[in-house]
C-alpha cells in the first residue's frame, strides 16, 4: 500500500470485509511488542470513557434564540 500525501491508505476490500469495516467505521492501530502494528475495529477494543460533553453534543432540540434562553435562566 502507498501512503498519500495526506497520510491516508486504501484498506483492501478483503481486509475491510474480514474486519467488518464500512464507511464511518473507526479503527485503532495497536503497537505490538515486536514494534509492528495491527489494525482493529475500534469497537473490538475496550471503549475509553466517553465525555459527558461529547455524549450531549448535537442533542439540543430547542429552537430558541440565545437571548430567549438567557432570559429563561435569568428569570429563575
Image: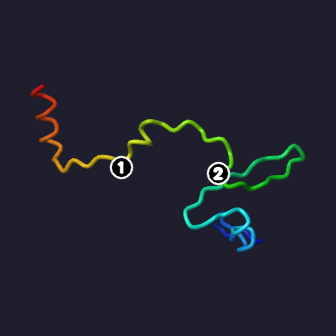
Q: Which mark is residue 16?
A: none
Q: Are marks 1 and 2 in contact (CB under 8 Å)?
A: no
In what element is the residue under mark 2?
A: helix
Residue lying farthest to the bottom in this orientation? 13
Of residue 73 and residue 44, the one placed in the foreground of this image is 44
Residue, x 67% and y 55% (percent of image)?
41
Disc with the residue nearer the chain's start (1 vs 2): 2
Please provide percent x and percent y for residue 5. Answer: 66, 68
Please provide percent x and percent y for residue 51. Answer: 48, 37
In what element is the residue under mark 1?
A: loop
Residue, x 51% and y 38% (percent of image)?
50
Crowdedness of circle 2 by 10 Å Cα count: few (<14), some, many (20+)? Answer: some
Please provide percent x and percent y for residue 21. Answer: 64, 64
Tally of numbered discs: 2
Find the distance from the CA under tag 1 to the CA under tag 2.
Answer: 22 Å
Please indicate whether residue 46 sits to the left or right of residue 62 in the image: right
Crowdedness of circle 1 by 10 Å Cα count: few (<14), some, many (20+)? Answer: few
Residue at the spot of label 2: 42
Name the image quarter holding the N terminus.
bottom right
Of residue 7 and residue 11, the one placed in the foreground of this image is 11
Please provide percent x and percent y for residue 54. Answer: 44, 42
Residue, x 69% and y 68% (percent of image)?
16
Q: Is residue 3 above or below residue 40?
A: below
Q: Is residue 57 above or below residue 13?
A: above
Please indicate whether residue 4 sits to the left or right of residue 31 in the image: left
Residue lying farthest to the right in this orientation? 34
Name the image quarter holding the C terminus.
top left
Residue at the spot of label 1: 58
Residue, x 13% and y 41% (percent of image)?
67
Amino acid at each position: 500500500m502507498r501512503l498519500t500525501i495526506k497520510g491516508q491508505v486504501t484498506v483492501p476490500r478483503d481486509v475491510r470485509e474480514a474486519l467488518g469495516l464500512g464507511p464511518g467505521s473507526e479503527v485503532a492501530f495497536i503497537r505490538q511488542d515486536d514494534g509492528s502494528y495491527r489494525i482493529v475495529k475500534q469497537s473490538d477494543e475496550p471503549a475509553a470513557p466517553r465525555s459527558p460533553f461529547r455524549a450531549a453534543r448535537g442533542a439540543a432540540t430547542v429552537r430558541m434564540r440565545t437571548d430567549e434562553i438567557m432570559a429563561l435562566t435569568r428569570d429563575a
